[in-house]
Amino acid sequence: MSQTTSGTKPAILIYGNSQAERLGHVAAHLPGLREKFDIKAIASKPAAEKDGASSFDDAFFADVRVVWRQIEPGDPAAHWQTLEPRIPSGCQIVTFPALHLFCQWPFIGADPRQIEASNVFYPWPDAIAASLAQEELPDDALFERFMRLSAKLLPDLDQRLRIDAARAQAMDARADIKLWDWIEANLRTRALFDAPTHPSPATIGEVLKQLVARTNELTAAEQLRTRQETDFMLRDYRGQDTEMVPVHPLVAARLGLAWYEPDRTYRWHGHEWTFREYTLKYIRWEPFLA
């Protein structure tokens, strides 16, 4: 995430992983929020790889009045501990959880091909597809075999959902913003994740609206305006659009995902692929970057 500073207004500092980065992208384009605050950001991963306390000068922190801090597994992380003393006294810190949903992608597992591949090669492994990597079959026969095998090995998705719930509730317990109840209430009617750790625009919007509601320096009228602007902007926002992992139709049926469409396309590094297209390309480990 990039730094943004003008020195003319108080600032909101957003700290977290790539989910927080997407949150910052949306926040920085909301007129009501920009009129009142500068939006600054520090990415937790780069901060972990260098001295977070010395990577930003005192001027960067001087006008920070609000911090939206993401809580991740394992917190308090060492890099946040180096940054926290730099936050001005009296600054409001509002915490929100890192978000994950694995039950929609139950076949995530080992793929030996990832060991030799670069990071751009299918970073979300599919154990069923990987098991068919050596099969030399026509498209129809290969996809049919994949479907038969995945039907045979489909796990108990209700149990997977309970595991997701327990993990999310543990994160919620450590954060000011609580998300799992909203996710559970909307899971079957709205696409909430594009990949296991990629919240969709709808979810990013909910996080942002809850953070705004907890930000003391915003009046009730300013909070209402920001929520309305968030809904308006996210109608066309594409989110983390480089990697959308398709949802298996059997998973959609078992979980009762009313929003699911069998012919839906998913963005993958500039491509628009159906579940079938993505699956066949993944099995064959086809390159997708020219």
Image (cartoon, helix red, strand yellow):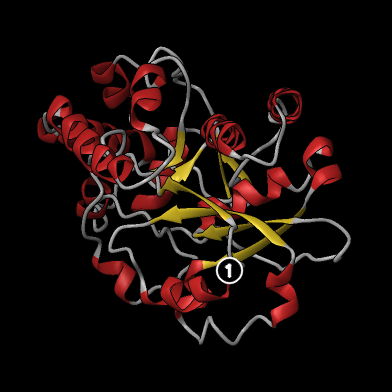
Classify the position of the N terminus by image quarter: bottom right
- Asked which quadrant contains residue 201, the reply is top right
**Count of labels shown?**
1
Residue at screen point 46% across, 30% down: 192
Q: Secondary structure at mark 1?
A: loop
Of 117 and 67, nearer the camera is: 67
Of 11 and 164, nearer the camera is: 11
Residue at screen point 30% across, 39% down: 105
Q: Is residue 202 above or below residue 38?
A: above
Q: Is residue 63 above or below residue 178?
A: below
The answer to whether residue 290 is seen in the rendering is: no
Q: What's under tag 1, amino acid-wise?
A: Ile
Percent from the top left, x then y, of residue 43?
56, 66
Instruction: State the residue position of label 1.
Output: 87
Residue at screen point 62% across, 39% down: 216
The answer to whether residue 160 is seen in the rendering is: yes
- Asked which quadrant contains residue 237, the reply is top right
Percent from the top left, x then y, of residue 69?
50, 55
Of 92 and 98, nearer the camera is: 92
Classify the position of the C terminus by image quarter: bottom right
Residue at screen point 57% across, 75% down: 86
Of 156 and 272, nearer the camera is: 156
Q: Is residue 103 left or right of residue 210?
A: left
Percent from the top left, x then y, of residue 217?
69, 41
Percent from the top left, x then y, of residue 224?
71, 22
